[in-house]
């Protein structure tokens, strides 16, 4: 495969040589444009028709207004042409562009009242021939410039690809190092998770003991309050409906302790619920960390292979831009 930079360098260095290699040959020719037989000159260029057509129209526009007769494809005339190198009198320029087998032929004729300037017998024939020759050289020069431009674009594209591959390779190396660090981190977190799980088991056991004691203490306190109220009732002491401050002191104390026991039970219940949620969270974290370690192990296998493939791609890309 021809490398882009090699092609680009060759086009830059040997641009003049390429122009010289593409010989512009001018030959007398006769063509019928419309109903008129024209004596003129023609050259065949190995350049795409669209470039030749546009170039030719621009080329002869400097001699006067270009007209394209209706019904005639690729026919371009300058009815009143002023061509200083040929003569000062207005003249008629007729031309037609045809294409066949990848080659584009430009025919043109210049006519004065006295005859065709493009007739080999006319004294200005050499000048008329030089005009067409200059156009042909211009077309080949522009073609070389287009080839250089396209080669430069291709080089830029392949250079960008090469740089992207290098950057990707650096990122992959970073990914591999991060993979190593992640494994250490995940394993450390999993160890902490295990320790947390053991601690939660102990905390739950302790909470259950506290909850049982609080529940037993509350039951005893309620029994005591009930017994105290019964004693007060049998003594004829009225306490129902009174404000707390007006109740018998022993009942106030017993009721206060009852409220505290109820708060202890509520507290132990809340702690138990909190521990239950912590256990669930701990279990989820364990599963997540185990899954991360599984993916980490898979990445540890995948990334080196991608690095190896990337290095090959980099080598190929570097070869393309050399």
Image (cartoon, rainbow, N blue to C red):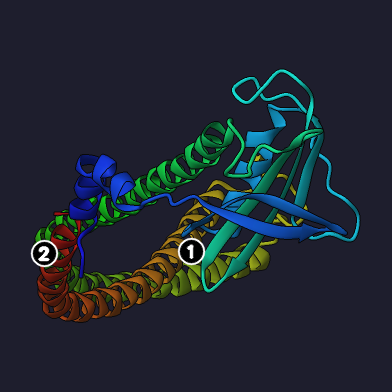
- Among numbered discs 2 and 1, the one appearing first in the sequence: 1
Residue receiving disc 1? 266
Left or right of 126? Residue 243 is right
Q: Residue furthest right?
A: 70
In percent of width and height, residue 250 lies at: 52, 52
Depth check, front residue: 54 or 175? 54
- Pointer 2 local density, CA inside 10 Å: few below 14, some 14–19, many at least 20: few
Give the residue at x 34% y 46%: 148
Please report contact status of discs 2 and 1: CB closer than 8 Å, yes or no. Answer: no
Which numbered marker is on residue 315? 2
The quarter of the image holding the N terminus is: bottom left
The residues bearing labels 2 and 1 have C-alpha atoms spaced at a distance of 71 Å
Depth check, front residue: 240 or 154? 154
- Can residue 4 be seen here? yes
| Residue 125 occupies quadrant | top right
Give the residue at x 20% y 60%: 3
In percent of width and height, residue 53 lies at: 65, 50
In percent of width and height, residue 93 lies at: 74, 39
């Amino acid at each position: 495969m021809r490398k882009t930079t090699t092609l680009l360098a060759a086009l830059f260095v040997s641009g003049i040589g390429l122009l010289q290699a593409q010989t512009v040959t001018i030959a007398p020719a006769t063509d019928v444009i419309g109903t008129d037989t024209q004596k003129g000159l023609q050259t065949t260029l190995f350049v795409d028709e669209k470039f030749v057509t546009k170039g030719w129209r621009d080329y002869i526009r400097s001699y006067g207004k270009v007209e394209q007769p209706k019904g005639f494809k690729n026919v371009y005339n300058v009815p009143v042409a002023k061509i200083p190198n040929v003569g000062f009198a207005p003249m008629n320029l007729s031309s037609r562009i045809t294409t066949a087998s990848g080659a584009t032929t430009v025919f043109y004729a210049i006519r004065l009242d006295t005859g065709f300037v493009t007739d080999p017998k006319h004294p200005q024939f050499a000048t008329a021939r030089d005009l067409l020759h200059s156009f042909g050289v211009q077309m080949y020069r522009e073609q070389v410039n287009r080839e250089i431009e396209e080669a430069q674009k291709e080089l830029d594209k392949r250079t960008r690809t090469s740089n992207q591959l290098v950057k990707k390779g650096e990122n992959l190396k970073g990914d591999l190092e991060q993979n190593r660090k992640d494994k250490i981190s995940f394993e450390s977190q999993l160890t902490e998770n295990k320790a947390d799980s053991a601690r939660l088991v102990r905390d739950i056991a302790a909470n259950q003991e506290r909850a049982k004691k609080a529940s037993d203490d509350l039951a005893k306190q309620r029994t005591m309050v009930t017994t105290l109220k019964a004693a007060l009732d049998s003594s004829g002491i009225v306490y129902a409906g009174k404000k707390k401050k007006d109740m018998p002191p022993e009942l106030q104390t017993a009721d206060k302790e009852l409220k505290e026991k109820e708060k202890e039970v509520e507290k132990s219940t809340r702690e138990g619920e909190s521990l239950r949620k912590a256990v669930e969270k701990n279990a989820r974290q364990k599963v997540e960390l185990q899954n991360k370690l599984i993916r980490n192990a898979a990445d540890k296998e995948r990334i080196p292979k991608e690095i190896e493939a990337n290095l090959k791609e980099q080598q190929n890309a570097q070869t393309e831009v050399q």
